[in-house]
Amino acid sequence: AYEKLWLACSVLLILFLIGTVTYGAVGPGVAMVADSEQPIDAQNLDEDDRFSDPRVEQVGENEYAAYVVAYQFGFSPDPIVVPENSRVTFYVTSRDVTHGFEVAGTNANTMVIPGEVSKLTVETDEPQEYGLICNEYCGAAHHAMEGKVTVV
Ligand code: CUA
């Protein structure tokens, strides 16, 4: 009986945490601008122009697109290298289960759902290394799922 109670508490806590990080404060260096989603075939990422080769691409003057795949248990590419003083739009999808994509210490944070592309735009300033963490429980090594966003 206690197990069910604990489970209910955990679910409430997780929902609460999702709520707070979604409306979290702006951190230094990286500021979130927008967030939206579009459909994709999670089973065939290798045939997708954007995600068969996860990468950062320049798309305009000081504008970049970062195509990122989350998986059990990591992010590709790793590190995600982006230039300083630029606008970077991350397109993030998952090849397996639901993950999180949170640039530690900033408000850049989104849920990553298989079958969807999460879009998140940030503005970088100075060169700095940020931790990238998964904040959605995704399996046995969830706690070890991390990457890096390096502003150069
Ligand atoms: Cu991926 Cu937790």
Image (tube, rainbow, N blue to C red):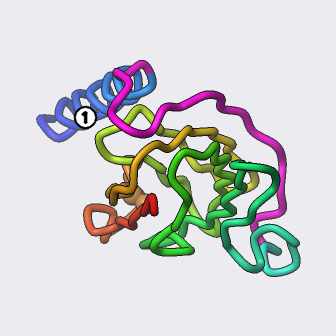
Q: Quadrant of the C terminus?
A: bottom left
90 is higher (above) or lower (below) than 141: above
Q: Name the foreground residue: 3 vs 134.
A: 134
Amino acid carrying mark 1 in the image? Ser
Q: Residue at x 62, y 67 (%)?
A: 69
Give the quadrant of residue 40: bottom right
Ligand 1 - quadrant of the structure image: bottom left
Specify the segment rendered in magenta: 23-43
Q: Quadrant of the N terminus?
A: top left
- Report the side of 25 relative to 111 (left or right): left
Q: Position of residue 95 (x, y in %)?
A: 65, 69
Give the quadrant of residue 97: bottom right
Q: Position of residue 71 (x, y in %)?
A: 53, 70
Q: Residue at x 84, y 48 (%)?
A: 39
Within-10-Å neighbours for mark 1: few <14, some 14–19, many 20+: few
Q: Name the foreground residue: 35 vs 114.
A: 35
SS class, disc 1: helix
- Report the side of 46 relative to 8 (left or right): right
- Report the side of 85 relative to 95 (left or right): left
Q: Residue at x 75, y 61 (%)?
A: 58
Q: Position of residue 46 (x, y in %)?
A: 80, 80
Residue 15, magenta (yes or no): no
What residue would you read off at disc 1? 10
138 is higher (above) or lower (below) than 43: above
37 is higher (above) or lower (below) than 42: above
Q: Residue at x 55, y 58 (%)?
A: 83
- Report the side of 57 relative to 39 (left or right): left
Label 1, ligand 1: CB separation under 8 Å: no
